């Protein structure tokens, strides 16, 4: 175990100076030469679009790939709540150091300090950048930016654009990208899905894609490959992720040598609309900014059938305020989610399924007035009404946790480069900054820090420092990978069994949710690890994909993604089984304190687990990157 | 409930298309419209027939992927609702529904209900941005934006680029889409330096892409799932006149100025 030493390339110096030192030491590429280097960026969400636009501006030849019809569809668009920045515009005691501290602590001490500090530093530049692009953030009457406080912190550092912050930030990055496309520095390859990575002489040198309209399998060579392809929450099938969100790009890269780090760190978001029907195809998030003003409660008595407005104050249990008096409804996501699960397991859940708790705005409406509440949260109340048919201004919302974000992802060093030289990974696709739990309003921050500022600095350094032989797609490595891709597609088309890919994902997702969701145990994980291979086997014998590979074929696209989810699901459970502690989003029932809180084991598990693919049916190999905490002292998190 | 569907089937861009009839059974009111189509596709897959291709992704009304006509109405006609958010509780047993793709020459059909909307991207490329290369920004609070301007800019920027406005317009004009982006950027102080050029270039791109002219039917506003108001088209026309006047030349081409067709 742990034979390869993972070098995170953390720069020297005090933490405040590491990023500056790193940038100073970086090699630069002469502006006149940049045009000669090509960079592939897969994904056009916040990280991908921002990186493509920024590298295009610098003068590199950028190729950006997306399976959507337009970069604007990327799932970043759906993020609601906001983006953190340590601006301290409120004079409420915020600082870069505090944002850094909160993020390391919120991540339950499983993130790399140096990365997180840099993230907090860059948060400030991100807001500047986005405002300059015309992102319509919320403003106060004097014309200054408005902020709010957001899950898990006590300062007001979250910038927002109503409940559609992700949309507005993505449109900002998308517009910058479109400007570069018009300028000819970026070539956009839409409706083009990456199906594999090509490694030549140990370096990432290109990708193989499928044109989703014509079905053509194509090779693309470059000097650098950047993956910004998002997370893998859809391994649970029902999640808040968009339907197409998948793990194929990162999983294929993993199979080509990139280590997969901390797959078991998955985030279950506390405020989603509860599942209502068995046909349901996805879950909808309600921004947790709602927890700023809404109060979470359930009836004190089991099986209280009264409608919520008839339940008097003394019969209500505001359990978050009761258990965590100092943070109340604003405790971090992992804690809020688990508390909701426990309450429902006790039989005090609400709604027809009993899988729900109330989020009540009655007091907020009394305090601030209906208009203010409408102004702040109007669109969220509308979404809620569309789905449930209920008016949350009149009756409390019902919410329940749902898979939402994955902290795990491909292992990267401080430069955001994976262990495969030339393969960089940004945004949710990498494992970097959130440790075992991500704080609210940090995903947008990380995606944009990676995309606007880090990758556009570290990729040129890699190019300048590593003179590469020119490789084109006639190289045998490309042809070999292309042949693999074609073979896999023809296999899926020829099985001709009885079940759709969709039905397999539904079954797999339920299995993973039940056994490796909000609570995990040795027994449940062993169960999942026994069942997943059986189901995967059935998939490869009983799949049915209608049509051919030479046309728009959505079932074929789905089948490829589901096949990769099967493999990832297994690694997810292996990682969860090996991590014999509870931390952040990873809760092992065997490891909890007497009052039911997560019990970390810093002695044995203060490391990042990076898994190496060893082949089908072979156990993956674990590599450990030890985590050291020089600035934030390891403490048991307490939000009481 | 059971429903009768008539769906446009077309295997590829230049293939002939036709309506085909299907029946779906046991649809429950808590399903969404797309979940009803999922059920149909599951059924077709089991019978060995090609599933109906339709675009969708977020299924919460924000990505703009989904969209087709239901009985001739873009997104099915529930106010402020994309087809992915449309609930089956608005339908009843025995309903007959005709589903067809957006019909506009600027949006060629790719397959079944899927159309090519890349013309929208090209309109954006012509000027739908504020040039602010990474790293060049001043402190965010150095730019004061009156709340009212920020709110209007946000209302306009809420457009999801689904194309319903084009599909609903008898002239297949892209005025609501283009004017929303122009209103977003032209309202903000950051957007002023490029305002005239942006307006002229985006308007020109719109015609170049083969979208029709606006003759004030107002159908676009009625179907817009984000309820983008038609007054933004008025903003755009004013900005065009302003830009043309300042540059002492004619607007490149455009909608006729508002005149009553009805
Ligand atoms: S699927 Fe995203 S808006 Fe309908």
Image (spheres, coloured by chain):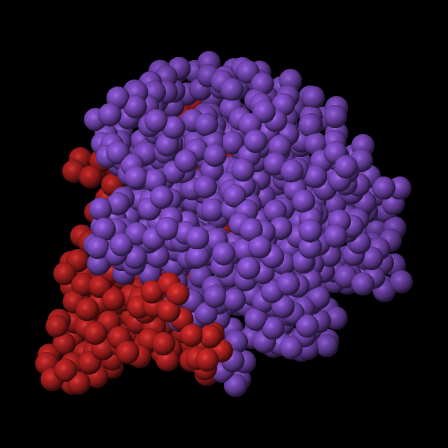
> In the image, residue A36 lies at what x, y percent?
22, 46
Query: Does residue A252 appear to the left or right of B180 in the view shown?
Result: right
> In the image, residue B243 lies at what x, y percent?
20, 80
> In the image, residue B110 lies at what x, y percent?
25, 41
Q: Nearer the viewer, residue A433 or A20?
A: A20
Query: Does residue A518 appear to the left or right of A212 in the view shown?
Result: right
Q: Residue at x 26, y 21 (%)?
A: A476
Farthest-out residue, left? B249
> In the image, residue B58 lies at what x, y percent?
46, 48
Q: Residue at x 25, y 56 (%)?
A: A31
Q: Nearer the viewer, residue B115 or B80?
A: B115
Q: Which chain is red?
A: B
Quarter of the figure with the N terminus of chain A: top right
Q: Is residue A158 at least partly visible in the picture?
A: no
- Dividing the picture into quadrants, the one containing residue A233 is top right
Query: Does residue B4 appear to the left or right of A12 in the view shown?
Result: left
Give the tally of numbered discs: 0
Q: Residue at x 48, y 71 (%)?
A: A137
Q: Nearer the viewer, residue B180 or A218?
A: A218
Q: Residue at x 88, y 50 (%)?
A: A301
- Dividing the picture into quadrants, the one containing residue A548 is top left
* Residue B68, placed above or below residue B143: above
Quarter of the figure with the C terminus of chain A: bottom right
Q: Is residue A471 at least partly visible in the picture?
A: yes
Q: Which chain is purple?
A: A
* Residue A623, placed above or below residue B36: above
- Dividing the picture into quadrants, the one containing residue A39 is top left
């Amino acid at each position: 175990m742990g034979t390869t030493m993972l070098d995170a390339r953390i720069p020297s110096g005090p933490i405040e100076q590491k990023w500056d030192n790193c940038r100073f030491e970086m090699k630069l590429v002469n502006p006149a030469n940049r045009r000669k280097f090509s960079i592939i960026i897969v994904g056009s969400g916040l990280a991908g679009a921002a990186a493509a636009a920024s590298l295009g501006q610098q003068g590199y030849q950028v190729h950006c790939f997306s399976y959507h019809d337009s970069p604007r569809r990327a799932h970043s668009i759906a993020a609601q709540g906001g983006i953190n920045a340590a601006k301290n515009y409120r004079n409420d005691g915020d600082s870069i150091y505090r944002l850094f501290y909160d993020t390391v602590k919120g991540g339950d001490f499983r993130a790399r300090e140096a990365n997180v500090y840099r993230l907090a530093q860059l948060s400030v530049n991100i807001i500047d950048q986005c405002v300059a692009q015309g992102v319509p953030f919320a403003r106060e009457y004097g014309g200054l930016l408005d902020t709010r406080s957001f899950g898990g912190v006590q300062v007001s550092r979250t910038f927002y654009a109503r409940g559609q912050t992700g949309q507005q930030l993505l449109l900002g990055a998308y517009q910058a990208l479109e400007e570069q496309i018009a300028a000819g520095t970026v070539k956009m390859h839409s409706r083009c899905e990456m199906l594999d990575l090509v490694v030549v002489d140990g370096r990432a040198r290109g990708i193989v894609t499928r044109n989703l309209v014509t079905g053509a399998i194509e090779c693309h060579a470059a000097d650098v490959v950047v993956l910004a392809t998002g997370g893998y929450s859809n391994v649970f099938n029902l999640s808040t992720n968009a339907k197409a969100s998948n793990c194929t790009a990162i999983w294929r890269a993993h199979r080509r040598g990139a280590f997969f780090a901390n797959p078991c760190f998955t985030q279950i978001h506390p405020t989603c609309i509860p599942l209502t029907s068995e046909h349901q195809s996805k879950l909808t998030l309600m921004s947790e900014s709602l927890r700023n003003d809404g109060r979470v409660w359930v009836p004190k008595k089991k099986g209280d059938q009264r409608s919520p407005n008839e339940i008097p104050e003394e019969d209500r249990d505001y359990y978050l305020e009761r258990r965590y008096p100092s943070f109340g409804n604003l405790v971090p996501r992992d804690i809020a989610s688990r508390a909701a699960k426990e309450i429902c397991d006790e039989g005090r859940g609400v709604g027809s399924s009993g899988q729900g708790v109330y989020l009540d705005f009655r007091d907020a409406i009394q305090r601030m007035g209906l208009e203010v509440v409408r102004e702040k949260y109007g669109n969220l109340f509308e979404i809620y009404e569309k789905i449930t048919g209920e008016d949350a201004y009149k009756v409390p919302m019902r919410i329940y946790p749902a898979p939402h974000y994955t902290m795990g992802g491909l292992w990267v060093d401080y430069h955001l480069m994976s262990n495969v030289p030339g393969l960089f990974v940004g945004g949710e696709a990498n494992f970097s900054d959130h440790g075992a739990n991500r704080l609210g309003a940090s995903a947008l921050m990380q995606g944009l820090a990676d995309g606007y500022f880090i990758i556009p600095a570290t990729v040129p350094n890699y190019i300048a420092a590593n003179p590469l032989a020119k490789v084109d797609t006639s190289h045998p490595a490309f042809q070999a990978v292309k042949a693999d891709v074609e073979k896999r597609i023809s296999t899926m088309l020829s099985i001709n069994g009885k079940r759709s890919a969709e039905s397999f994902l539904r079954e797999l997702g339920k299995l993973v949710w039940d056994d490796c969701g909000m609570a995990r145990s040795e027994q449940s994980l062993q169960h999942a690890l026994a069942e997943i291979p059986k189901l995967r086997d059935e998939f490869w014998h009983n799949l049915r994909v209608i049509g051919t590979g030479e046309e728009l074929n959505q079932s074929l696209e789905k089948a490829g993604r589901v096949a990769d989810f099967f493999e990832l699901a297994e690694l997810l459970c292996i990682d969860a089984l090996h991590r014999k502690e509870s931390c952040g989003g990873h809760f092992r029932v065997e490891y909890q304190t007497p009052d039911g809180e997560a019990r970390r084991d810093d002695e044995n598990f203060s490391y990042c687990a990076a898994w190496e693919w060893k082949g089908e049916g072979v156990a993956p190999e674990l590599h450990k990157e030890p985590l050291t905490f020089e600035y934030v002292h390891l403490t048991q998190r307490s939000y009481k | 409930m059971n429903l009768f569907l008539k769906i446009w089937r077309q295997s590829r861009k230049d293939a002939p298309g036709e309506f085909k009839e299907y029946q779906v059974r046991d649809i429950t009111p808590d399903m969404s419209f797309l979940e009803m189509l999922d059920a149909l596709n599951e059924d077709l897959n089991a019978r060995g027939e090609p599933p109906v291709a339709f675009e969708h992704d977020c299924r919460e009304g924000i990505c703009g992927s989904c969209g087709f006509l239901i009985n001739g109405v873009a997104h099915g006609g529930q106010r402020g609702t994309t087809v992915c958010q449309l609930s089956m509780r608005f339908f009843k047993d025995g309903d007959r529904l005709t589903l067809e793709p957006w019909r506009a020459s600027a949006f060629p059909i790719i397959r079944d209900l899927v159309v090519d909307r890349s013309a929208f991207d090209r309109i954006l490329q012509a000027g739908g941005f504020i040039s602010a290369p990474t790293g060049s920004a001043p402190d965010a609070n150095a730019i004061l934006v009156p709340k009212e301007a920020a709110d209007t800019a946000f209302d306009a920027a809420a457009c999801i680029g689904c194309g319903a406005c084009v599909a609903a317009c008898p002239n297949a004009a892209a005025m609501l889409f283009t004017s929303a982006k122009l209103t977003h950027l032209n309202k903000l102080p950051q957007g002023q330096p490029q305002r005239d050029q942006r307006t002229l270039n985006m308007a020109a791109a719109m015609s170049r892409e083969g979208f029709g002219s606006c003759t004030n039917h107002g159908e676009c506003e009625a179907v817009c799932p984000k309820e983008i108001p038609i007054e933004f088209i008025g903003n755009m026309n004013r900005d065009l006149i302003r830009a043309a006047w300042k540059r002492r030349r004619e607007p490149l081409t455009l909608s006729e100025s508002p005149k009553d067709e009805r």
